[in-house]
Image (cartoon, rainbow, N blue to C red):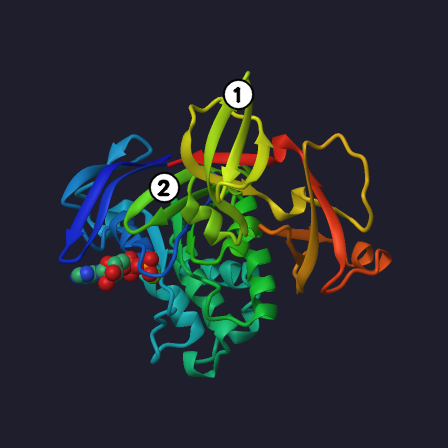
Amino acid sequence: MLKLKNISKSYKGFALADISLEINKGDYFVLLGNSGSGKSLLLELIAGLINANSGEIHLNNKNITNSKIQKRNIGLVFQDYALFPHLTVRNNLLFPIRKNKNKAEKAIKIAELLNITNLLERFPEKLSGGEAQRVALGRTLITNPEILLLDEPLSSLDVQLRGGLRHLLKKINRQGQTIVHVTHDYDEAIALASRVAVIDNGKIIQVGDTESVFKNPSSEFIANFIGLKNFFKSVLHTNNGKSFVLINNSTKICLLSDKKDGEGFVMIRSEDIFVYDKYTESSALNNFEGIIRDAVPSRLGIEISVETPLIFWVLITKESFERMNLGEGKKVWISFKASAVKFLKT
Ligand code: ADP
Ligand code: MG
């Protein structure tokens, strides 16, 4: 198990602040954050390329805070591959274990795992981006790292190659390799992670299993980050044990809440809102009449915006969209349950 305890590191103008994380053996741990949030710095700290100002790093109950890079048994694959241009793929793979016995066999085994056996005699300049990335991965895996750190390993590949490499990374993880993968791409996190931490401006703002992080974003930052569009500043009120929020002092939305009255944000996931082409009785407490203002195809279906006057985004399937003959300017009714409304106090 890898444990970061209250790690801090400051630069002029940027600081990683009081970072504590636990990464279990076998985890596929994704660290998600925007560009400049401190992801690469954190990996470099774990790998031992830089030292923290304070805090400790423990690996399998051993304090490695001051251990040299070579003694940590942690492998880092850089974002830009950094292969040795003057060495063939085979010699790039062999480089970290050049003093070991059985090194030739090891290189062959790794090449098979990564499907690069046919590239062994090539030089890096003759490799595609996806091939170079697999060689870089192989050069680190060959050292049998306890933890494999990946810095945005898919970001410079095109979409098709990404799929293949994701698959490969999952396979390596299933074979028992603990992986810490940093990315700014939440799709990637959803696709790969068993656990996710979100980093914003040098601070970890949420950690958990993938589903709980994405289903229950704990801050406006994460909600925005994952494209949640029904996100409104509001005031919570409770009356006779029933909770509701007021948005813009006019729209009332019922919810289940045990929080104290006050200001905050409400969020409703676009897939939790139902749309009808005529008025429909439902048990849902929240019902609005509105006009479709926009319809945008998305990865999962069609996102429509409904002006009620408050604008709600609703995700529906292409089939429903066509069956109800929806389109811009059409009058619709939307409904969602009180339990679909999340309130975050500010
Ligand atoms: P990310 O990988 O999330 O995009 P980085 O970890 O590379 O972000 O950088 C986080 C911040 O730290 C950036 O604002 C960057 O300018 C700053 N930074 C990184 N390295 C140094 C350094 N050696 N000296 C000063 N600032 C640095
Ligand atoms: Mg980076």
Which of the 4 image quadrants contains residue 220?
top left
Q: Tell me the element at label 1.
A: strand
- Rendered position, 287 above or below 159: above
Q: Nearer the viewer, residue 329 or 249?
A: 249
Which residue is found at the position 20% from the left and 43% from the top?
Answer: 8
At 52% from the left and 64% from the top, the residue drawn is: 111
- Give the numbered dot on residue 202: none
Rendered location of residue 204, percent (x, y)? 34, 42
Q: CA distance from mark 1 to mark 2?
A: 32 Å
Residue located 52% across and 58% down the image:
109
Residue 205's tag is 2
Label 2 near ligand 1 (CB < 8 Å):
no
Give the residue drawn at x 70%, y 41%: 335
Tags 1 and 2 touching, CB below 8 Å: no
Identify residue type, mark 1.
Answer: Asn
For the residue marked with disc 2, what is the amino acid? Ile
Which class describes the residues within 10 Å of circle 2: few (<14), some (14-19), or many (20+)? some
In the image, residue 115 above or below residue 254: below
Q: Is residue 263 above or below residue 86?
A: above
| Of the pair 24 and 278, the residue shown nearer to us | 278
What numbered label is drawn on residue 239? 1
**Along the line of sight, which residue is nearer the eye, 57 or 132?**
57
Residue 160: x and y, percent?
61, 69
Q: If the picture is divided into quarters, which one holds ligand 2?
A: bottom left
Position of 255 compared to 346: left or right?
right
N-terminal of the pair, mark 1 or mark 2, is 2
- Relative placement, left or right, of 183 versus 169 is left
Q: Element at badge 2?
A: strand
Expressed as whole percent of the image width and height from the top left, the position of residue 148 reads: 40, 50
Query: How many residues crowd mark 1 within 10 Å: few (<14), some (14–19), many (20+)?
Result: few
Q: Residue furthest top?
A: 240
